[in-house]
Image (spheres, rainbow, N blue to C red):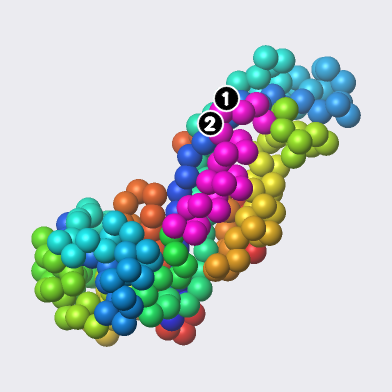
Amino acid sequence: MKAYLHRRYRFSASHRLHSDQMSEEENRATYGKCNNPHGHGHNYVLEVTVSGQVDPNGMICNLVDLDGCVQREVVTLFDLENLNNRPEFANSVPTTENLCTVIYDILKRKFSAAHLERVRLEETMKNSFEISS
Amino acid sequence: MLYLTRKAEFAASHYYHNPELSPEENRRLFGKCNNPNGHGHNYVLEVTVKGEVDPRSGFVVDLKQLKEIMNHEVLDAMDHRFLNKEVPEFSSRIPTTENLAIAIWNRLAPKLTTARLHRVRVYENHDLFVDFYGESS
């Protein structure tokens, strides 16, 4: 029987939203406070949803495997880092949309024990972004 | 079509053990959750039903009736219980959150008459929850 499992993780990182393709004025107009040259930070909450048949052990997948993969492949990359300095954002602006996409692509490649349904990323209590398969 | 969700909380204990596996395999697979003395959670249950709004009552479902079904089928059976020992479904199945969502679905679905069950969501804690949409999903 197919079920969906949701797991939440946390990491904190800083970023500055700034595009080299825009003028200083355009950057300020587009990104507002987020364009502050010194950057600012968030406590991100990452919600990963996987799906699959429930096996005889009562599991969609072993949580230890999922936790290990997300921790190793995602959380350690970004936790307590400046996202602008990360190679993933060498050519893109570290908006939460782009961060969500990067995380989805990593997990799609690295986690195979269950089907990756959705990656949802909360930037604040008010803002969240999600990508579904 | 309209969807209505009702929440309930219950506290229960459980442990994970597959009798077909060796003690070592059980420990490796389930880790701390294999402790036979059990451990507990404050589960949060979200039951979502769907249906058309009754033009006379303005209801998708009689909330009092839904609450009574949830109380009777889930809370009376599972609140402050040891799931492995006191809930019959788990004499042959491991009471993981996945199986708990399926068991709750199977208890509620036949009891609902006016609205149909859409989703059972069970939070084991704030950071881990399971959705089940029925066998046909």
Instruction: Check residue A71 in the rendering and tell me which mark sits there, or answer none.
Output: none
Q: CA distance from mark 2 to mark 1?
A: 7 Å
Q: Is B2 positioned to the left or the right of B125 in the image?
A: right
| Residue displayed at 82% across by 17% down | A25
| Residue displayed at 32% across by 52% down | B125
Q: Quadrant of residue B105?
A: bottom left
Which percent across, then down, holds residue A100? 64, 46
Q: Is residue B7 visible?
A: no
Q: Is B36 positioned to the left or the right of B55 in the image?
A: left
Numbered disc 2: secondary structure: strand
Q: Number of callouts in the render?
A: 2
Instruction: Check residue A41 in the rendering and tell me which mark sits there, or answer none.
Output: 1
Can you say whether A106 is above or below B47 in the image?
above
Quadrant the C terminus of chain A occupies: bottom right
Q: Mark 2–mark 1 contact, CB under 8 Å?
A: yes
Q: Nearer the viewer, mark 2 or mark 1?
A: 2
Which amino acid type corresponds to the residue marked 2 in the rendered image?
Ser
Residue nearest the observer in this picture, A34 or A52: A52
Q: Quadrant of residue B16?
A: bottom left
| Residue displayed at 37% across by 75% down | A57
Q: Specify few, some or many for label 2: CA neighbours under 10 Å numbering under 14, 14-19, or 20 or more.
A: some
Numbered disc 1: secondary structure: strand
Which numbered disc, 2 or 1, marks the residue that appears first in the sequence?
A: 2
Which percent across, then down, holds residue B107? 24, 79
- Residue denoted by label 2: A12
Q: Specify few, some or many for label 1: CA neighbours under 10 Å numbering under 14, 14-19, or 20 or more.
A: some
Which amino acid type corresponds to the residue marked 1 in the rendered image?
Gly
Which percent across, then down, holds residue A91? 83, 36
**Magenta residues?**
A64-83
* Residue A75 part of the magenta-drawn span: yes
Quadrant the N terminus of chain A occupies: bottom left
